[in-house]
Image (cartoon, grey):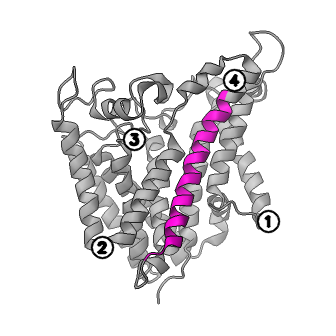
Amino acid sequence: MTLPQRLKSLDVFRGIAIASMILVNNPGSWDYLYPPLEHAKWHGCTPTDLIFPFFLFIVGAAMPFSLSKYTKENCPTREVYWRIGRRALILFGLGLFLVLFSLTLDVFLNGAPAAKFATIRIMGVLQRISLAYLISAIAVLHLQRRGLWLFAAILLIGYWLAMQLIPVPGYGAGILTAEGNLVGYIDRLIIGQQHLLGGKGFDPEGLFSTLPAVVTVLAGYFTGEWLKSQPRESRTSINLAIVGICCLLIGHLWGFIFPINKQLWTSSYVVFTAGFALLLLAACYELIEVRSFQRLSFPLEVMGLNAIFAFVGSGLFARILIKTRIGIGSDAPSTYTWIYQHLFKSWAGALNGSLLFAIATVCFWWLILYIMYRRNWYFKI
């Protein structure tokens, strides 16, 4: 017995990723965070550093189901390329829209100089998802399974060798600091320093480091393709967990010579986070597909079905709260800060209030997504 074309466990996995992303992106104050909700300063990996690769992994895991009619006997048509390109373009455009929206609010509400538009950040989370999806989808359409594995290996090993062997002017080869790494140097050459995050010399969602992120998507694709032919049994969950543990071990060992680093999206980070993704998916698969714990997973499924809407909507809403002010004068707090201080910090304290603000934000967006779910409103691209 094989699985149906849609797996609820994938929607729940996606729901976990988007709920976690909203949680870590919306603390009451960035000065008060519990350590697991912070990114690693540079090398290393915290629970928060797992969220973005989980998102990319699930993009890949869904591809065997969405592209199945184009990856068997049928040759890809102009229509499928149009759909892939259109989806990638919309995702990239949404990422740029978030940046432009924030700058526009700054100009019209806070009197920021319009010249800031000339230094708009080009890359970002949605932009990386867009490019990684585009490259992965085209590879899936044109390469057989062995070719895909070879392509993934070339990207990971090639990226590792490039980072270690290609010298950066003024620093040399193999420098993995924020200032002297090859990723920042290439992004400065191609994109321009003024278009990187904060106008600095390095962007954690830059262009060059998107190449190994493609492998994170492909890891999800390999998993989803395998799941399509597996029986709905605990053995499937166990096999996912075993491979996940192996990836954790390989990624950890690789990290001794090529450190695990989210901002550089190192090859060891790709393998290491794929291991955690497989373990989480194994748990979701066992609970939902095998043991049918549907009711317990329902809240997360609701979030997973409209994940992009939740990400973009929560980003827009947060920017509005941050850019608008309660009161008059330069010392007037932003609406965001006022809510945190008066509704959360005032009784829960700075640290717990910051966490409760983030949890309340997740609940707020879950309610919106639940209303959309009840009305069968789904934001698809």
Asked whether the residues under the numbered discs 2 and 3 touch, taking CB atoms below 8 Å apart as contact, a structural biologist would say: no
Residue 103: where, in percent of width, then height?
A: 65, 28
Q: Which of marks 3 and 1 is in front?
A: 3
Quadrant housing residue 135: bottom left
Determine if residue 127 is in view. yes
Alpha carbon separation for disc pair 2 and 3: 26 Å
Q: Is residue 233 left or right of residue 362?
A: left
**Which mark is first along the chain, 1 or 2?**
2
Q: Nearer the viewer, mark 2 or mark 3?
A: 3
Three-letter code, disc 1: Arg
Alpha carbon separation for disc pair 3 and 1: 39 Å
**Label 4: element kind:** helix
Three-letter code, disc 2: Arg
**Label 3: element kind:** loop
Residue 310: where, in percent of width, then height?
A: 66, 50
**Which mark is first along the chain, 1 or 3?**
3
Three-letter code, disc 3: Leu
Residue at 79%, 65% in the rendered image: 374
Q: Is residue 155 magenta?
A: no
In the picture, the disc for residue 106 is 4
Q: In this view, does 50 lie above or below 142?
A: above
Three-letter code, disc 4: Asp
In the picture, the disc for residue 207 is 3
- The total number of labels drawn is 4
Q: In this figure, which residue is indicated by the disc labeled 1?
A: 374
Q: Nearer the viewer, residue 307 or 297?
A: 307
Residue 238: where, in percent of width, then height?
A: 37, 71
Residue at 54%, 72% in the rendered image: 79
Q: In this figure, which residue is indicated by the disc labeled 2?
A: 145
